[in-house]
Structures are given as C-alpha cells and as structure tokens.
Amino acid sequence: MKEKEETIAFEGTVTDALPESRFRVTLENGVEVLAYGSGKIKMHRIRILAGDRVTVEMSPYDLTKGRITFRHATARIDTGYAPRRR
C-alpha cells in the first residue's frame, strides 16, 4: 500500500521556539525551515525546546516548511531531583 504522499525526512536542531507551537529548525545541511509538532507529539505532550535534536518530515513540493515527528533523546544533566510519584 502506497502512502498518501511521499515525504522527505531530515534531522536537525531546534534553534528557536516561536508562537503558536512553531519552531525554527536548522537542518544538518544548514538550511533553516519552519516546523510544527505532529499530532502524536502534541497528543503525548512531548516538550520541544531550543537545542533539541529532532526529525523533520517535509513535502518535496515545499522545502521551507516541515512537521516534527520525533525528538531524539539527549543526555540530561542529573540534578539529583526526582519527581514524586502519586
């Protein structure tokens, strides 16, 4: 079964968080694109901050806009704080 529309996936780094859940992402090849979080990202309330490594899917027709589909795990600094479980 063929996808509805072919997409191109790139990896990049979030450089800026903009209003209305948009992000400015610099791709590995140096190109800056405007991206938004996918429905799964919003549904699972995954936080995306400046400096995060992400995977962006883009349409071959408009290579200036994209959709963030995955936030890569980054090494977090251990602050010694553990949130309480309820």
Image (cartoon, rainbow, N blue to C red):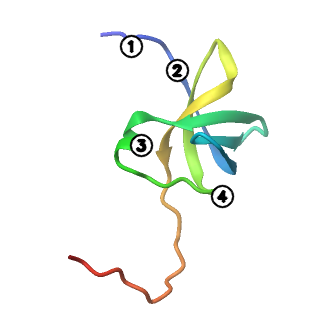
Three-letter residue code for mark 3: Lys
If you read the primary sequence from the N terminus, does the residue marked by circle 2 or circle 4 appear first?
2
Q: Is residue 2 left or right of residue 25?
A: left
Q: Which residue is mark 1?
A: 3
Q: Which residue is mark 4?
A: 51
If you read the primary sequence from the N terminus, does the residue marked by circle 1 or circle 4 appear first?
1
Q: Which residue is mark 2?
A: 7
Count of picture labels: 4
Residue at image x 42%, y 43%? 41
Disc 2 is placed on an element classified as loop
* Mark 1 touches mark 4? (CB < 8 Å): no
Label 1: few (<14), some (14–19) or many (≥20) C-alpha neighbours in 10 Å: few
Residue 70: x and y in percent read: 47, 44
* Mark 1 touches mark 2? (CB < 8 Å): yes
* Mark 3 touches mark 4? (CB < 8 Å): no
Q: Which residue is mark 3?
A: 42
